[in-house]
Amino acid sequence: MRFQAMLGAATMLAVCLSTLTPGSGAAQSGGESVATVSTGSLTSGSTASGFGDALNEMRARNGLGSLREDAHLTQAAQAYAEDMARHAYFSHTGRDGSTVTTRARGAGCRGRGYFAENIAWGQKTAQAAFSGWAASAGHRDNMLGRNYGVFGLGQSSGMWVLIFADGC
């Protein structure tokens, strides 16, 4: 089975989706600076609130404003994490062909067109997922994206989904 083969391949599998520039479909880098990684406010039992605190601390250390958790994006992230876990796949493209943009908009987030998604598989805690993303240049770029104002985090059976948008 595809899922079992991937499971043995690595503990940290994470893929980064570039942001979309409104109206152009062109990829755009999210952040310019190098992140200092600290998960001081994120404990092993933390979920979205602790994750948001750690994310905003990281952004502040890099001269960026804070993000707020958004219920629409959290709903989209949670549903997608559950779908990947339930159907044993790991991809930015949903089984139905959906993308982060269509999933976020389907959950009620309109935004102006800046969306990004980090996914990870195999981490047991929010702290581990955060640390893995923060240590990966593409994922860190999303976490430090200047165009984002909101985020949503979901997880199911070791599948983690973090969605960013300019607003909802």
Image (cartoon, rainbow, N blue to C red):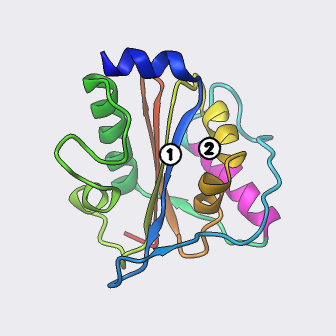
Which quarter of the image is occupied by the N terminus? top left
* Residue 41 % position (x, y): 75, 41
Q: Secondary structure at mark 1?
A: strand
Q: Secondary structure at mark 2?
A: helix
Q: Which mark is residue 65?
A: none
Q: Amino acid at mark 2?
A: Phe
Picture quadrant where residue 45 is located: top right
In the displayed structure, 84 sits above or below 164; it is above
* Residue 135 % position (x, y): 72, 45
Residue occupying image coordinates x 66% and y 70%: 31
Circle 1 residue: 15
Circle 2 residue: 51
**Classed neighbour count for the residue bearing mark 1: other residues with Cα under 10 Å, few (<14), some (14–19), many (≥20):** some
Outermost residue, left side: 96
- The answer to whether residue 80 is magenta is no
Between the C-alphas of marks 1 and 2, the distance is 19 Å
Picture quadrant where residue 106 is located: bottom left
Please tell me whether mark 1 or mark 2 is closer to you in this view. Answer: 1
In the displayed structure, 53 sits above or below 80; it is below
Residue occupying image coordinates x 67% and y 71%: 65
